[in-house]
Image (cartoon, rainbow, N blue to C red):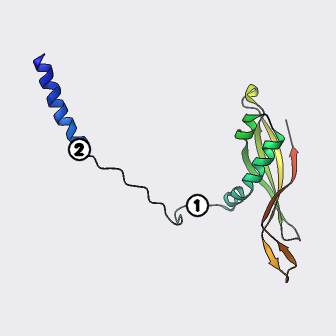
Amino acid sequence: MRKVIVLFTILFILTSGDFVNAKPSEPKVIKPYAEDWYVTPEDIIKDIVFPSIDKKVTQEYSGNDEAIFGWQFQRIVGIVYNNNHSYDISINIQVPEGSSTLGNYAHDLVKVRVSPSCDSPKIGCSHGFKVEIVEYSHLSG
């Protein structure tokens, strides 16, 4: 028994030095801008239209938590410039049809109008920044 106590005491002394000499982790420094990030125009468009599409999916699929939390941005189908200084962006999204049909997705098309803020009598526009759902179509499902 005495040998076991001596052995544990020696092991404790040898391993406790690591705890004493341990250095705290360095705090992560957040850069003011990310010079090493690669951001595409599609990433920027996603950031702008995501909240509006999320609200619309919540309305279209109310009661289906899998759809509300599991829908995915697939791809931008088209971007059209309108003469009222706005852009219509057509986007394909994929929405889960429910937990009972795991792996089955409904494919929907969302047309979002993005109107950048404009206050110029020269080009005849006076409106604030606005993002709105123009059309929502269920392609399958």
Mark 2 neighbour class, 10 Å CA radius: few under 14, some 14 to 19, many 20 or more? few
Q: Which mark is residue 38?
A: 1
Residue 113: horizontal and vertical position, in percent?
83, 60
Disc 2 element: helix
What amino acid does circle 1 point to?
Tyr
What amino acid does circle 2 point to?
Val
Residue 123: horizontal and vertical position, in percent?
85, 80
Mark 1 neighbour class, 10 Å CA radius: few under 14, some 14 to 19, many 20 or more? few
Disc 1 element: loop
Q: Earlier in the sequence, mark 2 or mark 1?
A: 2
Report whether 32 appears left or right of 2: right
Report whether 35 appears left or right of 101: left
Q: Which residue is pictured at 77% across the width and 46% down the height?
A: 93
Residue 72: horizontal and vertical position, in percent?
72, 44
Q: Which residue is mark 2?
A: 20
Residue 55: horizontal and vertical position, in percent?
77, 48
Between disc 2 and disc 1, the foreground one is 2
Q: Which residue is pictured at 88% across the width and 70% down the height?
A: 84
**Is residue 65 or residue 82 the one in the foreground?**
65
> On screen, 80 above or below 72?
below
Q: Which mark is residue 117?
A: none
Are circles 2 and 1 on residues that touch, CB within 8 Å? Answer: no
Quarter of the image for the C terminus: give it. top right
Quarter of the image for the N terminus: give it. top left
> On screen, 78 above or below 136?
below
Q: Which residue is pictured at 75% across the width and 56% down the height?
A: 49
**Extreme residue toward the top, this view:** 1
Q: What count of labels does the image hold?
A: 2
| Cα–Cα gap, marks 2 and 1 | 41 Å
